[in-house]
Amino acid sequence: MPAADSACIDEDTALLSDAALAAASIGLSFFRRDPRVWKKENDSPVSEADLAIDRFLKERLLAARPNYGWLSEETEDDPARLGCERVFVVDPIDGTRGFLAGSDQWTISLAVVEGGRPVAAALLQPSVSHLYTAGYRRGTFLDGNRLRLQPRPSLAGVRVAGPAVLISRLSRPVPTLRSRGYVASLALRIAMVADGTLDLAFARGGSHDWDLAAADLIVAEAGGTLETIDGAPITYNRPDADHDSLVAGLPALTRAAAAAIGPY
């Protein structure tokens, strides 16, 4: 388990929150203004906004914590992070496709990882000014208000978002589920479980540390869990930052959903 003390966690959470808020102005300066876009090797888009926010965050965060490692979607990976006690895990724009389409479903996702788990997190949805924050054993907050998941007795009527294939498989044994479609930002999709907008959020295989770390802590500190469909916990800051298919929700619901979906 993480060993960071509460004062350090609070300071890191504040640092991430301030950095996300400052970076938002950069993102908004490009939003709905036709930024330049390139394709990565995996055919996913990256815009000049992604790169500008990434440069800003790397300079600001590492200036404040020069002994922390760095892992970001838009920075070439440095294996030195594996030897660092704490690591910044950053997605400058999570939901780039949504950002480029002019949707509000994009976020700036920031976390500090220690001992393979996130200990501080800030997730900002700039276009609507919503800020989620969380600290290990410190709780989850949305715009300063404490979040806590409420018990739910069964899968009947659950509100779900994620890839169509997973929602379709769940709908067969749970025909009363209510699909909320596909939320472009995976981090936001998971955080929507923490704020009660969703009961379950799914992710297909191939997501990465930077998509997940902040949202993982946000849902965990609200009383939920993010885990593989097979029920395994997630470990961060490994040599390979990829992950299998995932589900977020109350522990009892994620277990029930995994059983209903079957082997995947």
Image: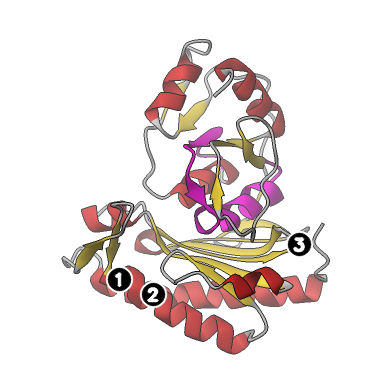
Picture residue at 62% right of the left edge, 75% below the top: 80
Q: Quadrant of the C terminus?
A: top right
Work out which residue is located at the far bottom of the displayed protein and give it.
Answer: 63
Element carrying mark 2: helix
Picture residue at 65% right of the left edge, 56% below the top: 236
Q: Is residue 17 left or right of residue 5?
A: left
> CA gap, disc 2 to disc 1?
6 Å
Circle 2: is it few (<14), some (14-19), or many (20+) Cα within 10 Å? many
Residue type pointed to by label 2? Ile
The reply to whether the magenta stretch includes residue 212 is yes
> CA gap, disc 3 to disc 1?
31 Å
- For disc 1, the marked residue is 49
Looking at the image, is 21 positioned above or below residue 133? below
- For disc 3, the marked residue is 115
**Residue 224 percent coordinates (x, y):** 68, 41
Observer able to see residue 69: yes
**Residue 154 percent coordinates (x, y):** 64, 19
Picture residue at 42% right of the left edge, 74% below the top: 54
| For the residues bearing labels 2 and 1, Cβ distance under 8 angstroms | yes
In the rendering, which numbered label is found on residue 53?
2
Of residues 23 and 1, the one drawn nearer to the viewer in this rendering: 1
Residue type pointed to by label 3? Gly
Looking at the image, is 185 positioned above or below residue 35? above
* Range of magenta residues: 196-224
Of residues 244 and 102, the one drawn nearer to the viewer in this rendering: 244
The reply to whether the magenta stretch includes residue 103 is no
Observer able to see residue 13: no
Residue type pointed to by label 1? Ala
In the rendering, which numbered label is found on residue 227?
none
Of residues 107 and 147, the one drawn nearer to the viewer in this rendering: 107
- The answer to which of marks 3 and 1 sits earlier in the sequence is 1
